[in-house]
Image (cartoon, rainbow, N blue to C red):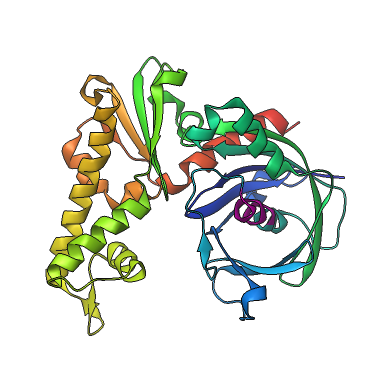
Amino acid sequence: MKKIILSADIGKYETELIGRDLALTADDRKTVRFRTKMYDLAEGYIDVEGNSHLVELNKKSYIVGEQGQDKSEDTSKTQFLHQIACYTAITQFIEPGTKDNDIYMVLACPLSVLLIQDAKEEYKEFIKGKGPIKIAVDGKDYEFEIKDIMIKAEGSGIIYLEPNLFNDQAVGIVDLGGLNMGWSLYNNKVCKKDDRFIEECGTDRLIDIVREQLAIYKKGNLVNKEIAEKALNEGGLKKAGKIDTESTVYVEKAKELYFEEVLKNIKAHKFNIDELDRVVFVGGTSQHIKENITNKLNHSYIPVNSQLSTVEGLYKVAFKKYGK
């Protein structure tokens, strides 16, 4: 019997898991990351490429990861995409062909779901499944059973990762994810129900603003989302293989406008960040606007690896609960 302890953040943009077999050492801890996207091979066969996996589940075949075409546009995570992404990632922590792999997991939950007890339980049971799960990944057979899941709020991992930031402090956490931005106000590590909110203002919204700005630069000619995302990641559009420095100004303007929108959302929900001891920004989108944040807010804090701060912190929770 193998006991595998995991933390998981199955985001709209990326699926992230951290963990290890309890019988192994701390040095054997592994991080698994790939895009939360899926392609149904019933729509036509393609070879697996990049950070993607060929997956067979319930007698159907899919490609999960970077190469996928369908991604989540919904705040809810009780979708097959999230389930298959989680199961695919879990297989990377166990040996193929083995049985009796027991999974114990702390799972990040969207704030909108966390606030509704029935929805929270539905998400938990949806991911947990009933009994052993059999799945084939990249031509190898895996079997495991999720024995228990603890639910924690998205963005809350930083509290367990860097607790000194929150001791006797009033701290706002801004979690900038793929689809949403989440806000939670913690007073000495405690967050009340009314001190949370969620808005659709994550990476997708930033990319939309980048598209708008690049359309202005190109005098009305539209840029598709893939090109806009590439320009965001690289700092501008490419021209003859090099960054077009004139386009960089418009990408920077998009970041500025996006951050203003984030701050407006916080203000609209009647939170005054100037009164807080600290404002912590987590999530991958925080890295895109790091300079905007630090220049505007003297009391801001951005973890070095903000993309993984949730799953890193929740792994500490998982090991404390299940690592016995």
Instruction: Using the rendered view, name the quadrant where residue 33 is placed.
Output: bottom right
Start-end of magenta stretch: 79-87
Relative to 59, residue 288 above or below: above
Eyeballing the image, is 302 above or below 35?
A: above
User: How many numbered tags mark residues here?
Assistant: 0
Q: Position of residue 148 (x, y in %)?
A: 74, 35
Image quadrant of residue 54? bottom right
Is residue 166 at least partly visible in the picture?
A: no
Is 104 or 131 nearer to us in this picture?
Answer: 131
Q: Residue at x 65, y 56 (%)?
A: 89
Residue 277, percent across and down? 28, 21
**Residue 181 in the image: above or below residue 57:** above
- Quarter the N terminus occupies: top right
In this rendering, position of residue 217 left or right of residue 90? left
Residue 175: x and y in percent read: 39, 39
Q: Main secondary structure of the magenta part?
A: helix
Tell me if residue 316 comes above or below residue 20 in the rendering: above
Left/right of residue 171 with respect to residue 249 in the rendered view: right
Residue that appears at 17% across and 41% down: 295
Left/right placement of residue 137 relative to residue 286 reads right
Residue 194 part of the magenta-drawn span: no
Q: Is residue 82 magenta?
A: yes
The residue lying furthest to the bottom in this view is 240
- Quadrant holding the C terminus: top right
Q: Is residue 204 visible?
A: yes
Q: Position of residue 85 (x, y in %)?
A: 62, 56
